[in-house]
Image (tube, rainbow, N blue to C red):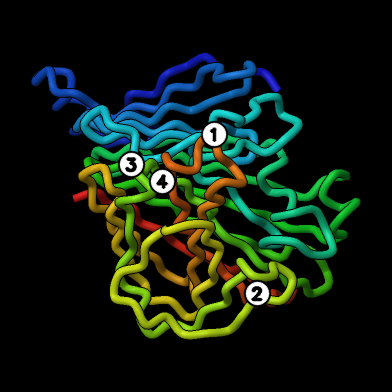
Amino acid sequence: MAALSMTWSCSPLTSSKFRRVNRYSGMAFASVKSTEGLGNLPKLVLTSPHGSEAELYLFGACVTSWKVDSKDLLFVRPDAVFNGQKPISGGIPHCFPQFGPGPIQQHGFGRNMNWSLVSSENVEEKPVVTVELRDGPYSRAMWDYSFHALYKITLDKRTLSTELTVKNTDNKPFSFTTALHTYFSASVTGASVSGLKGCKTLNKVPDPTNPVEGKEERDVVTFPGFVDCVYLDAPNELQLDNGLGDKISIKNTNWSDAVLWNPHLTMEQSYKDFVCVENAKIGKVQLEPEQSWTAVQHLTVA
C-alpha cells in the first residue's frame, strides 16, 4: 500500500472563516500529513494549533505517539517491529475481535491488518482523521463474518480522543471482545492508577488460563512486579500518575472494563519504562445484522 504524500492544513469541510483566520493572522493551524513511517509503512501525523502531535500507522490503526509540550506520553517498545507482518508493540494497539487468548490468534486480527483512510478534517481547530477496516480473506480465515470498523482520532491541545465503531454487515449475528492496549511512558516504580477501588478483579498472574477472582481494596494501585489484572465494571474515569511528573485522565464511554499490565522481568529490556492501562470490553458484545457498537476514549494530560 503506497503512502500518500499530501498535507491537509484544512479540509473541504473546514469553514472559510477558519481559513481566513490562519491566512491573515499567521496563527498555527491544525494539519494532517501523510508520510512514510518506519519500515516504509504509511503514517499519518496530526498536529494541533497548540503544538501537540500524534502519529497513526495505518497498519493496525496504531497510534504510536502522542506528544504534548514535545513530551511523548505513549511508549513503543524497543523490540517493536515495523514490517507489516507483526503487530506494532506499543502506542495504542487494537485488540479485535478477541481480547487475549482464544479460538483465534492472540488479541485478534485488527492490529495485524491495513486500515484505510476514510477522511481527514479540521473540527473546531482540531485535526480529526477517520480510518476503517473491513473483512477480507485474512480475517475470514479466522473469523468468518462481514463487518465494518470505523476508528476516529481527534487531537486537541492536551487531549487525544478515539472513537471505535463496529458494525455487523453480515446476514447473521456475531459477538466479539475488544480493547485498546494502551502503552503509557512511565517510571514503573513511581507509576500508579487511581479510581479502581471496589472493582471486581480477575488476577491473571498466578495462572493466565484460570484467573483468580477478587476485589480491589486499594485507593492507589501500583506496579510492584509482574501485573496482569482485569477490572470488571470499572468507572468511566481513571487517573494515571506515570511517575515522570505527568497526571493523565483516562475517560471512556462504553468501555466497561479496564486492564493493568506490566511484564516486569519477562521483558527486562523495557518494562521499567512503561505501564499499560487499557480500556476493554471483556464480556462479549453481541450484534445482530446491521447493528453497531461504539466506544470512546479520552486521554487528557493535566
Q: Earlier in the sequence, mark 2 or mark 1?
A: 1
Label 2, on which residue?
285
Q: Is residue 137 above or below residue 54?
A: below
Nearest the viewer among 73 and 253 is: 73
Given residues 159 and 201, the one toward you in this image is 201
Residue 301 relative to residue 122: left or right: left
Where residue 228 sits: x, y (%)?
Answer: 56, 63
Residue contact between numbered discs 4 and 2, judged by CB atoms under 8 Å: no
Q: Which mark is residue 269?
A: 1
Considering only order in the chain, which callout, 1 or 3, is on the residue closer to the N terminus? Answer: 3
Task: Give the structural element (helix, strand or loop) at label 4.
Answer: strand
Q: Residue furthest right?
A: 141
In the figure, is residue 152 to the left or right of 286?
Answer: left
CB atoms of marks 3 and 1 within 8 Å? no
Q: Is residue 255 left or right of residue 137?
A: left
Q: Residues within 10 Å of mark 3 (few under 14, many from 20)?
A: many
Identify residue type, mark 2: Val
Q: Residue at coordinates 38% horizontally, 48% vertically from top-left?
A: 188
Q: Quadrant of residue 268?
A: top right
Q: Secondary structure at mark 3?
A: strand
| Earlier-in-chain disc, 4 versus 1 | 4
State the image quarter where residue 9 is shown. Answer: top left
The residue that mark 4 highlights is 184
Mark 4 and mark 2 lie on one chain; the one further toward the N terminus is 4
Which SS class for mark 2?
strand
Q: Which residue is mark 3?
A: 155
Q: Residue at x 26, y 27 (%)?
A: 70
Label 1 neighbour load within 10 Å: few <14, some 14-19, many 20+:
few
